[in-house]
Amino acid sequence: MKVTFSGAAREVTGSCHLLAVNGHVILLDCGLFQGKRAESREKNGRLPYPPDELSAVVLSHAHIDHAGRLPFLARNGYSGPIWCTPATRDLCAIMLADSAHIQQKDAEYLGRHGGVAVEPLYLPEDIAPCMRQFRTEHYNRPFDVVPGVRATYVDAGHILGSASVILECTENGNSRRLVFSGDIGRWGQPIIRDPQTPGGADAVIMESTYGDRDHPGLEDMRERLASIVTDTAARGGRVIIPAFAVGRTQEMVYDLHALSRAGRIPAIPIYIDSPLASEATRVFDGHPEVFDTGEHMVRTVRDLFQFERLHYTTDVAESKALNTQRGPMVIISPSGMAEVGRIQHHIKYGAPDARNTILIVGFQAEHTLGRRIVERRETLRVLGDEVPLRARVEVLNGYSAHGDRSELGRWLARVREASPKPPPVWLVHGEPPGQEALAARFRAQGHKVHIPGPGEVATL
């Protein structure tokens, strides 16, 4: 039994790991790399294994850095099953279609303006055939992936439908219980349930995004959000929020809804400027079975994602009109790292105005526009132009859907409690400083910890 770490190895994006057992090769996630365009394009075009020789794909969740290369995999010859939870399938249907559309438009734009011929990884017509390969299984129901490998999904508490994966592997009479964490969520996060610990393990592949820091409390985030919206509105400015269409957008809407109901923010318009976010919200509405019914609003409010002053914009003309509209407002628009989509236009228009606030509510990978905003660069290169950054920049990392170092430690401690001895841990999905800090913490607790590089192979 061997695992090859092909993506999200000493970096955050491109989650992809190969499990070889009993002559079969199973892919754990197949995500897009994000960051520098040329470097990401080169990485994304390299598949980790001949697609027609893969036996199965087991997907942890729908975020594009975990699922974004699946149509490319299918387009290049993979015809087997893609396992996931029902909510993940429904989110992938819209997210992968959106990814194909963005790639196509980017390629057309670069061809027209940069004279660069770029081939999209896949096209909109590749999505439907890929989606026909999806197979779903609910949480806590074991299913056979290949002979000798039985998988079980448990709720990772990260986004709607997200899962950690228990893989019970038997080869030549030897059995091993491998746990792939996927992305581990947070305790007390709105809407979705807390992470479910997957019992014991003989080995763990574990995310480490925030391995060197703790987040502020979620209640503190709502208070700070109220303050930022109120202060910006008083200046006559707009709050511009790059947010992932799935998970973060719905969380921001939920908190703004709660603040609006409590009279804690001024009555200014709030725009969700993204067809994808609008569709994702409909998927959320369709899966209340995975909501956290311990929350008062979940139990008592019929329409969590609809309220007065909230508007969903879908067509391009509406989106463009926002940048000529006067007066305070809130604009929430993907992508979460401000790399593509309508958010770039809002930043290009809004960054030079000191009355405005750009609010960052999630992790920003290296070499992304979102990271440059967090670093408060004097100028930003947006859509080919140099734009001065005069708007205020606020960062609310407490909104992250990734567990912090204490929550990651809490998750692993519960895995260890149910294990005969401390399982070895392979840290993925993180940048080296955070991974090294988390590794030191876990080693002090008796775990053997590895931080694999791209292409590194581990024998279980």
Image (tube, grey):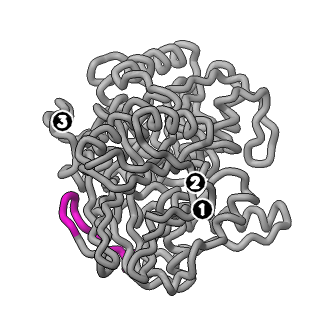
Q: Residue at x 28, y 31 (%)?
A: 188
Position of the C terminus by quadrant: bottom left
372 relative to 268, above or below: below
Q: Position of residue 249 (x, y in %)?
A: 42, 41
Query: What is the secondary structure assignment of the residue under circle 3?
Result: loop
Q: Which residues are magenta?
A: 131-142
Whether residue 281 is situated above or below residue 392 in the rendered picture: below
Return the disc, 1 or 3, that comes first in the chain's sequence. Answer: 3
**Rendering quarter of residue 109:** bottom right
Q: Taking 438 as reference, is 56 left or right?
A: left
Residue underneath mark 3: 301
Q: Nearer the viewer, mark 3 or mark 2?
A: 2
Q: Is residue 206 left or right of residue 135?
A: right
From the viewer's side, name the closer residue of 137 and 246: 137
Residue kind at label 1, given as amino acid type: Glu
Amino acid tagged 3:
Val
Q: Which residue position is annotated with label 2? A: 452
**In terms of depth relative to the viewer, which is nearer, 386 or 201?**
201
Q: Residue at x 49, y 19 (%)?
A: 228
Residue receiving disc 1: 456
User: N-terminal of the two: label 3 or label 2?
Assistant: 3
Near-viewer residue (242 or 237): 242
Q: CA distance from mark 1 to mark 2?
A: 6 Å
Inter-mark Cα distance, 3 to 2 = 46 Å
